[in-house]
């Protein structure tokens, strides 16, 4: 098997892993109102399930990341996928609200592990000139999962209800194990096994400024994505605008298509203009789109606004897999990108509850809740990334890889 074929197989497997992980997460977004009614609770209270999932992702990123740094990317990625598939399936069987919340909390741990391991495995296995477009492709797995969840919601929800949706998610996710089973281990990780293992505490101490900067940056990124996605279908389109099931499904398909386009386009663009420049450009372009996206009334203009917004949001995100892996200390590359990403996610995990509360206090009008979070997040990303660090030319060749500078160097 040629090196190019091996690299393509790794990219396919890791893309599918993140796609199905996101698919399982976004099923909850579509059925949030129905789950709340089933368990006799409010929509605002039900958003706690989203918060718990997001809040536990740093735990999964750290635990699974450390295991992958010690035992290899491939076997831990397989174990991780099995975990989130099983937990997703049993979420559909939850007899009580408490059981459901516990399962979504554990799902958050499993979900938190996939991104960091998959991204490090891909970036360590591909040629350097592939990093930009592969980064966009990997991150497009997130809106691809949202897109797939939208299709399944549109077709299957009237037939199987919210419980059946979770069961479908669990079964479909198991298919990814086949693809991961067929790929080879990261050559970078294999090369490092001959070198002494570095203490994670020492590595983080030597890169403390980098870690703090990365966590704050990723907090802004997660407010940007979750602030434009989590309540958009169930609260904004359904409750505020009272659109039909078919209309919501169509708009969601449109904006997820935009998200995929944005991730691929800006990821590839970052290979030519730089990671920081591409991210700043995408986040700044989101600002003039906000009025159309959050304050339009017709389904057509809302679809146009959502399409453009997600091009910008996932355009910025499309650069992140490459960017975080390039700035990561190489000794902990399976841990660092996923952990700072998910720790930023934890700091932004109250977003859905915050936006739901703002909307409820404004008579279930969510426009200002969406617009304020998206606008503030876009500005923060432009500032933090614009004045941050970039290592686009770093080599990933095992023990011979370039050392990583601290933030600000």
Image: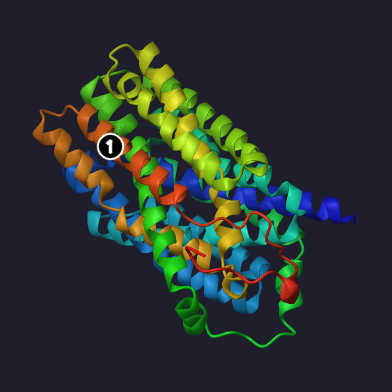
Colouring used for the render: rainbow
Nearer to me, 135 or 156:
135
Locate residue 139: give its quadrant.
top right
Nearer to me, 76 or 343:
343
Residue in the image at 57% along x and 40% along y: 140
Q: Is residue 184 left or right of residue 260?
A: right
Horizontal and vertical percent position of residue 226: 36, 43
Horizontal and vertical percent position of residue 272: 67, 40
In what quadrant of the picture does the N terminus appear? bottom right
How many neighbours does mark 1 have within 10 angstroms: few (below 14), some (14-19), or many (20 or more)? some
Q: Is residue 145 visible?
A: no
Q: Residue furthest right?
A: 1
Q: Residue furthest bottom?
A: 196
Q: Is residue 4 above or below residue 369?
A: below
Residue in the image at 54% along x and 57% along y: 324
Q: Is residue 89 above or below residue 307?
A: below
Q: What secondary structure is found at the residue carrying circle 1? A: helix
Q: Is residue 48 visible?
A: yes
Horizontal and vertical percent position of residue 91: 38, 53
Q: Which residue is mark 1?
A: 34
- Count of numbered marks: 1
Residue in the image at 52% along x and 65% along y: 409
Horizontal and vertical percent position of residue 262: 55, 32
């Amino acid at each position: 098997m040629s090196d190019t074929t091996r690299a393509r197989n790794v990219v396919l497997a890791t893309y599918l892993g993140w796609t199905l992980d996101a698919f399982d997460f976004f099923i909850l977004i579509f059925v949030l109102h129905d789950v709340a009614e089933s368990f006799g609770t409010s929509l605002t209270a039900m958003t706690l399930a989203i918060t718990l999932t997001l809040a536990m992702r740093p735990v999964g990123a750290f635990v699974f990341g450390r295991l992958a740094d010690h035992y290899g990317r491939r076997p831990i990625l397989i174990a991780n996928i099995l975990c989130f598939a099983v937990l997703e399936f049993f979420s559909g069987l939850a007899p009580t609200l408490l059981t459901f919340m516990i399962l979504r909390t554990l799902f958050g741990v499993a979900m938190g592990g996939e991104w960091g391991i998959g991204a490090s495995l891909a970036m360590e296995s591909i040629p350097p000139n592939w990093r930009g477009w592969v980064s966009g492709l990997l991150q497009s797995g997130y809106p691809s999962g949202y897109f797939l969840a939208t299709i399944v919601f549109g077709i299957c929800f009237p037939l199987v209800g919210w419980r059946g949706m979770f069961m479908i998610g669990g079964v479909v996710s198991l298919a990814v194990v086949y693809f991961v089973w067929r790929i080879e281990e990261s050559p970078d990780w294999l090369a490092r096994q001959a070198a002494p293992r570095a203490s994670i505490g020492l590595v983080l101490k030597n890169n403390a400024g980098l870690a703090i900067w990365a966590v704050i940056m990723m907090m802004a990124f997660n407010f940007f994505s979750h602030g434009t996605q989590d309540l958009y279908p169930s609260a904004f389109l359904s409750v505020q605008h009272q659109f039909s099931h078919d209309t919501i499904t169509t708009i969601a398909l449109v904006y997820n298509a935009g998200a995929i386009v944005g991730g691929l386009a800006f990821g590839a663009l970052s290979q030519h203009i730089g990671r920081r420049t591409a991210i700043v450009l995408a986040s700044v372009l989101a600002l003039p789109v906000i009025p159309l996206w959050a304050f339009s009334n017709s389904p057509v203009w809302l679809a146009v606004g959502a399409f453009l917004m997600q091009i910008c949001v996932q355009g910025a995100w499309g650069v992140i897999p490459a960017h975080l892996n390039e700035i990561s200390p190489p000794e902990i590359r399976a841990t660092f990108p996923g952990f700072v990403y998910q720790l930023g996610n934890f700091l932004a995990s109250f977003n859905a509850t915050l936006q739901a509360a703002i909307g409820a206090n404004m008579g279930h009008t969510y426009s200002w809740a969406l617009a304020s979070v998206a606008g503030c997040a876009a500005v923060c990303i432009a500032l933090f990334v614009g004045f941050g660090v970039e290592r686009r030319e770093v080599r990933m060749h095992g023990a011979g890889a370039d050392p990583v500078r601290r933030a600000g160097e």
